[in-house]
Amino acid sequence: MSLPPIFLSLLLLTGAAMQVHAEPLLERAQSRGTLNVCTSDEFPPFKTLDAQGNPGGLIMDLIVDLQEQLATRIGQPLKLSLVQVNPLNRLLFLDQGRCEVLVTSLLDTPARRREVDFAGPGFYSSAATVFAPKSTAIPDWESLRGKTLCAPATSVWVRPFESRYGVQFASFNGTAEVRKAVADSRCLGAMGDDALYSALARQPEWADYEAKLPGQDPAPWGIALRKGQPELLAAVSAIVERWHASGLIIDLEQRYGLTPNAWVAAQHVRALQGLAQHE
């Protein structure tokens, strides 16, 4: 895909700023010739592993594109090193400088923005839903009052839904533990991202499960960076804008057979309108 002139100009300016005002994390990446990216296990097809253990999927494709564009920006090759994280340690690893960026299905929320910076405007979006067996009757959100759902301990939706609907939660360290608890019938279902669980329901081993309810409290998935990295943040934000303007994420949705994400479609239109205004 060709790079629109407005984005090319922005990226060249950003690249020059990065060389003049190098930041600690970027300096380390340049000196070692490796970009460290924190990432976690996700539901297929957002993150997959082949028979040899090599990662793939929509998020992995975006990580590779991010690596290549940053390498072009700084004018030197950058190898890619993936740092495996989980919901409990991902922000800690980022704060400790173990990676330059964190690319997962991390929701960009006001509370998290007090801890880290997010490259705008985000690259995907999801909302809260309930994932449960098809045979389980959950007609609406109010019917969950007094019921127990499984959720990751770090979920931003736990407290709001406890207050709003009187839901009780059993907390787990990560999504793998949540899935096992649901399969073992230790809770009525799982509270989680509608985009992820709708994709999971299409996997053969989860054919008897479904996302039950219309999503609530939507939020974008953002690429997170440690605070105090303004040049790197500007460069990554420009790359994310290019993904939306070029339609790359929509292309990846089609490649992986995902249901079109309305928020992604809206971001594509917005980015194209922004380009038209600058022509």
Image (spheres, rainbow, N blue to C red):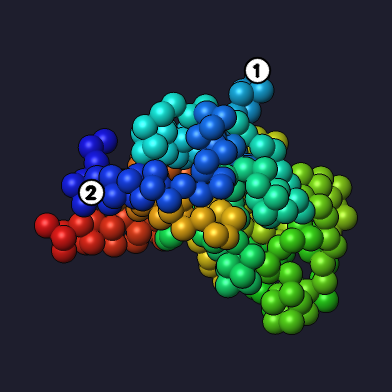
Tell me the kind of residue under disc 2.
Answer: Ser
Residue at 50% x, 38% y: name it. 63
Left or right: where 186 falls relative to 245: right
Numbered badge on residue 175: none
Query: Furthest-top residue in view?
Result: 52
Left or right: where 73 falls relative to 35: left
Q: Is residue 69 visible in the rendered structure shown here?
A: no
Give the residue pinned by disc 2.
9
Q: CA distance from mark 2 to mark 1?
A: 40 Å
Q: Tag 1, which secondary structure? A: loop
Q: Nearer the viewer, mark 2 or mark 1?
A: 2
Instruction: Where is residue 197? Give x, y as percent.
Output: 62, 51
Instruction: Where is residue 200? Give x, y as percent.
Output: 62, 44
Give the residue pinned by disc 1.
52
Q: Tag 2, which secondary structure? A: helix
Tell me the kind of residue under disc 1.
Answer: Gln
Left or right: where 163 falls relative to 262: right
The quarter holding residue 261 reads bottom left
Indicate whether 201 appears above or below 264: above
Query: Furthest-left residue in view?
Result: 279
Q: Is residue 176 visible in the rendered structure shown here?
A: yes
> Which one is nearer the viewer's eye here, 275 or 264?
275
The quarter of the image holding the N terminus is top left
Left or right: where 74 falls relative to 104: left
Asked whether the residues under the numbered discs 2 and 1 touch, taking CB atoms below 8 Å apart as contact, a structural biologist would say no
The quarter of the image holding the C terminus is bottom left
Instruction: Where is residue 156? Give x, y as percent.
Output: 68, 67
Query: Furthest-bottom residue in view?
Result: 163
Instruction: Where is residue 135? Give x, y as percent.
Output: 73, 55
How many C-alpha atoms fall within 10 Å of the one at disc 1: few (<14), some, or many (≥20)? few
Residue at 62% x, 43% y: name it. 99
Pointer 2 or 1: first along the chain:
2
